Amino acid sequence: MSATAARPSDVLPGLGRKIGSLRRERRWALVTAYISLIIAAIFMLGPPLYMLLTSLKTSAEIADLSRSPWSISEITFSNYAQILGDPMFRGFFYNSIIVTVLVVAITMVISVLAAFALARMRFFGSQVLATGVFLTYLVPDTLLFIPLYQIVGGLGLLNSIWGLVLVYPTLTVPFCTWIMIGYFASIPKELDEAALIDGANWMQMLTKIFIPVALPGIIAATIFAFTVSWAAFVYPTAFITQPDSMPLTIGVVSQLIRGDTFAWGQLMAGALLAALPPVIVYAFLMDYYIAGLTAGATKG
Amino acid sequence: MPSDASAALAPGRAPASAARSSSLRRFARRRSTVAFLMTLPLIAVIGGLVAWPASYAIYLATLNRRMTAFIGLENFDILLENETFRGVIWQSCFFAITAVLLKALIGFWLAHMLHHIPSKGQRKWRGMLLVPWVIPPALSTLGWWWMFEPSYSSINWLLNAFGGPSIPWLGEPWWARISVIIVNVWYGAPFFMIMYLAALKSVPDQLYEAAAIDGATGWQGLVHVTLPMMRNIISITVLFSLIVTFANYDIVRVLTNGGPRDLTHVFASYAFQVGVLSGNIPRGAAVSLFMFPLLAVVAFFVLRGVNRRQKEMA
């Protein structure tokens, strides 16, 4: 560093100092960056780690106030064994899986078809509809749950997972359609022209060209639909009051908390198990997950 | 009707192929019919499950408690005269604005820090920092609730270990408000970080080089290059998050359930309490409709920002 500082300073006295200060500035910036990131990581990962810690402790150790809550003396899996042995909890899991699988399937069919039509076939009102999709995405579920409560009740679907399958698409369809429009619109027109010349019809064009080419987008949209239906909370809280039909989110929150003495270890074990599927999907498909998140803003 | 309209339009759109116009016209008619059928399920979802319930909410809000008589705007009148509800309005705005500002600032800061470290490590850090966004908020809030629990609070234990006092996180109104904001910021800041990081990556390096040659400091580069380039993304994410935060339900429901003394209720949780738990559906609908004006204003600006961005990208 001294060599680089010495040579140019003979010619231009100011420059050497400038390079030195730039380098110092860069190193200082790097140190700041790492310090900020470490603090952020502690803040972001602290709660889930503490949940994990609690779930691995015995009830006696959780209740022991003389020890640090952040330490653990012996690891036990009894909380997990107990919660997995609870038929009610397994029922929540089962309900969540059915509802999520159905909603993801319905969502993808609706939004891929609609996005294909909106991206490629201009027709009367298609522009208005595309804007409408975006506006619908901005309408929060908390604005709709009371009228939907009446409607679902009118259909006799309160306390049934079919009511959830009916209303969850309001959470997933608008955004999935929106990002699929973006992905489909980015496919070059030459591809569909070539397909048309070869005599393909619209359905073939969609299944043989658009879906394979836009596969990353479809994966991103599927992940989005999956995480949203898995995490949905407002609708099941409003529509489901019987434990038999509860999905995981409301099941864990309402049924595992009973009385004044909470089984904290079991509660945390249940919450972590319930959060596991989206976390696994995220761990393996992080790039698609992030593409789906950012697609809404960078593409549209 | 849709098929007629675009059939008439199609030849005008492709004048070069006028020779094949008769087959084209037939084709176009078929195409728009197909397109309409393809969008029909979407229209059903938007119309039947969003537009119809939204208008139904307005109708419901004008009924009396037993839903037998039309009472006009009386529900809104009663609510506005209610001390608790005025507190709800105040708390909703305070919660949403504070939380969104903090999320945006923390997200921007973290995105910047991530952008500055060598790209090899970025993936790992990004992966870790996004974890709060991935866990369903109702479940992660349970973890926070346990950490705030008065007698076993692990946060208070840490505070005590560093010589600080114990804090009544969920017991005292102001601390309860702050707790709700902390959890919301924890959950939402990673989203901002990811959005801003994507936006930062799309700013061409040449701009910074040019600014550096002109003698700009890091701060000037931020103010005169980064911020103008990201202005649109920043406004879209902030506005979007304002809607989501304003309409938040899970965190308040799990963490405080509106307490202490109904002082941490936001519109969504209060609407739930009044409409579903107390069984006054029309008044609950009226509460949730109070969210509508703000949503409309924000939606207008988001849409404008998105359109502008589309024009820039085109």
Image (cartoon, rainbow, N blue to C red):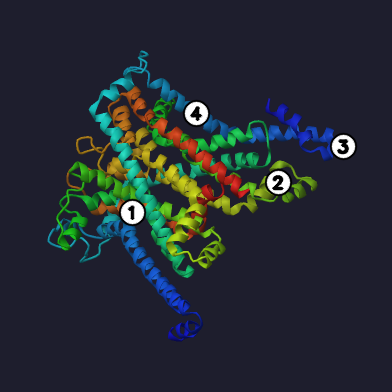
Chain to which mark 1 belongs: A
* Residue B51 tag number: 4
* Residue A272 tag number: 1
Say which amino acid is labelled 1: Leu
Q: Is residue B9 left or right of residue A165?
A: right
Q: Does label 2 or label 1 sit earlier along the sequence?
A: 2
Question: Visible in this render: residue B280?
Answer: yes
Q: Is residue B71 left or right of residue A286?
A: left
Label 3 to label 4, Cα distance in Å? 44 Å
Q: Is residue B65 above or below residue B39?
A: above
Question: Visible in this render: residue B132?
Answer: no
Chain to which mark 2 belongs: A
Label 4 to label 2, Cα distance in Å? 32 Å
Q: Position of residue B32 (x, y in %)?
A: 70, 33
Badge 1: residue crowd in 10 Å (few <14, some 14–19, many ≥20): many
Which residue is label 2 attached to?
A205
Q: Are marks 3 and 4 in contact (CB under 8 Å)?
A: no
Q: Is residue B145 left or right of residue B304?
A: left
Residue toward you, B179 or B308: B308
